[in-house]
Image (cartoon, grey):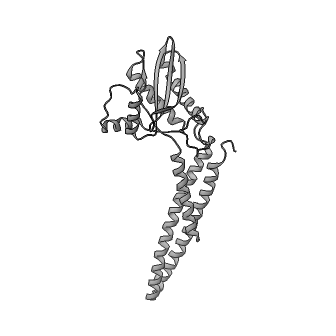
């Protein structure tokens, strides 16, 4: 196997690593929450949107954008007055949105305490595969941020504990963020940048290799025509393309190796 083919193999591995990492993240949507008479519809819509934002911040889910969700439901002609509370309605919404899982919530007030129940549903089966319960005292406008953040963290903690079957077995436990909602580790961000560099380097190497083939053709034509000036120009172009190709492939392979090493390095590693 020559250097060019070996480099293309490494680029293919980089693409596969990106696809695998992306496919391992649950694809979800947060539907409008339900509530009792103490909570208005507009407040419930805001809280469900805030919950979606907090789930995005965990970097452990692919969350469908709320505006995109509304657009899809309108395009599909979905008719529903108020939020979905039945399993059949939730499954229908999830199927129309094309997601694997739904997050639904119910907010009620008992005296000075607000209680929020979050359900994590498998759209395919309609089964609730995990639920978390929260409660906080205070005025809703004062606790809404903490309520949503705590809910997202508790849901993520349940996933990381292995209690939720929606988590792909190919995802190591330390591949998910901590329950505190901490952003992706710096070394993983560097790893993603290096894997992207590997793809760019591989593409550049392929380009320079193709350009070199064209210069070889020019060299042959100039040699046949006995054109000394064209020969020197073609020879210079061939040398330059060869150098650029080798540098590009070298950067591609090096970035891939270092990027994969950083990506799979244990989360607790320094």
User: From the viewer's perspective, is residue 234 above or below residue 99?
Assistant: below
User: From the viewer's perspective, is residue 89 above or below residue 26?
Assistant: above
User: From the viewer's perspective, is residue 195 above or below residue 236?
Assistant: above
User: From the viewer's perspective, is residue 173 above or below residue 111?
Assistant: below
Spot occupied by residue 117 in the image (x, y as percentages of width and height) = 50, 24
Pick the front one: 48 or 242: 48
The quarter in which the C terminus is drawn is top right
Residue at 46% x, 79% y: name it: 217
Q: Residue furthest top?
A: 111
Spot occupied by residue 130 in the image (x, y as percentages of width and height) = 53, 31
Residue at 42% x, 29% y: name it: 87
Residue at 42% x, 15% y: name it: 38
Q: Which residue lies furthest to the right in this view?
A: 270
Spot occupied by residue 122 in the image (x, y as percentages of width and height) = 47, 36
The quarter in which the N terminus is drawn is bottom right
In the picture, measured across the screen, residue 99 lies left or right of residue 12, that is left
Spot occupied by residue 168 in the image (x, y as percentages of width and height) = 55, 43
Pick the front one: 89 or 77: 89
Q: How many marks?
A: 0
């Amino acid at each position: 196997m020559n250097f060019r083919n070996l480099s293309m193999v490494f680029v293919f591995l980089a693409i596969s690593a990106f696809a695998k990492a992306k496919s391992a993240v649950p694809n979800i949507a947060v539907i409008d929450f339900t509530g009792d008479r103490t909570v208005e519809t507009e407040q419930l819509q805001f809280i469900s949107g805030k919950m979606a934002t907090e789930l995005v911040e965990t970097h452990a889910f692919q969350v469908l954008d709320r505006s995109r969700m509304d657009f899809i439901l309108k395009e599909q002609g979905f008719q529903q007055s108020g939020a979905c509370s039945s399993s059949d309605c939730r499954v229908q919404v999830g199927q129309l949105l094309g997601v694997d899982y739904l997050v639904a919530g119910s907010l009620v007030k008992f005296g000075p305490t607000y209680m929020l129940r979050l359900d994590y549903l498998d759209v395919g089966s309609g089964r609730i595969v995990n639920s978390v319960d929260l409660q906080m005292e205070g005025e809703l406008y004062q606790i809404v941020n903490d309520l949503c953040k705590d809910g997202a963290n508790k849901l993520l903690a349940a996933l990381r504990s292995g209690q939720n079957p929606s988590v792909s077995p190919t995802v190591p436990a330390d591949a998910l963020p901590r329950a505190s909602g901490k952003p992706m580790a710096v070394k993983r961000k560097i790893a993603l940048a290096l894997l992207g560099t590997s793809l760019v380097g591989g593409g550049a190497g392929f380009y320079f290799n193709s350009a070199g083939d064209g210069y070889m053709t020019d060299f042959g034509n100039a040699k046949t025509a006995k054109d000394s000036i064209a020969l020197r120009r073609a020879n210079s172009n061939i040398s330059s393309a060869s150098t650029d190709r080798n540098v590009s492939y070298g950067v591609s392979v090096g970035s891939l190796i270092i990027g994969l090493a950083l990506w799979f390095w244990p989360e607790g590693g320094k």
